[in-house]
Amino acid sequence: MQNVVDGLKAKAAFEPTLINTLVKYSENARCLYQYAQLIFKTKKASLNRLIKQGYCKAKQALQFETNYYMQNDLVKVMRNLIIQTRINHKIHNKAAYIAKSLYKFFDDAVLDYHDRINMHEVKNFNIPIVKLN
């Protein structure tokens, strides 16, 4: 398990809190590796789809090094997804359930990133001031 953790620290740029969360809820190294693999595969698929849709900053938005907000939220999302897949016995394909949620998470992360960048580019925005009597 330590080899997988070392790889996630060195190559994946995962924050320690994300790694600790994944380790805590993984039964073994194989399970930890599968969680990390789900994160990478869904992130890559979301990136490719969003670039085709014209989101030019999607790559920066989905890099852990450039989007600090995403990694903080990813810790919470992964913890909740793992817990849900363990307690809800109606979920038969746990990997598909997690992947579907991660696709939405990464899509939302790109949209949020674009909104934060474009917030500074708003021009000719005037708030009308109404005088109250």
Image (cartoon, rainbow, N blue to C red):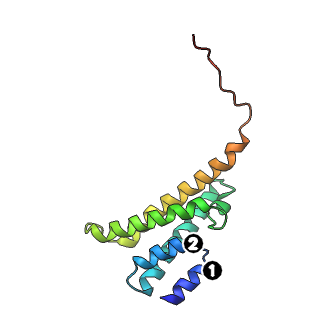
Q: Is residue 45 left or right of residue 129?
A: left
- Residue 118: x and y in percent read 68, 46
- Residue 46: x and y in percent read 56, 63
Crowd rating for badge 2 (residues with CA inside 10 Å; few <14, some 14–19, many 20+): some
SS for dot 2: loop
What amino acid does circle 2 point to? Glu
- Label disc, if present, on residue 11 of the rendered structure: 1
What amino acid does circle 1 point to? Lys
Which quarter of the rendering shows the C terminus? top right
Q: Is residue 92 left or right of residue 131?
A: left
Crowd rating for badge 1 (residues with CA inside 10 Å; few <14, some 14–19, many 20+): few
Residue at position x 64%, y 49% from top?
A: 116
**Residue 51, located in which quarter of the rendered image?**
bottom right
Residue at position x 43%, y 86% from top?
A: 30
Along the viewing direction, whichever of 41 and 23 lies nearer the viewer: 23
**Residue 88, located in which quarter of the rendered image?**
bottom left
Along the viewing direction, whichever of 54 and 82 lies nearer the viewer: 82
SS for dot 1: loop
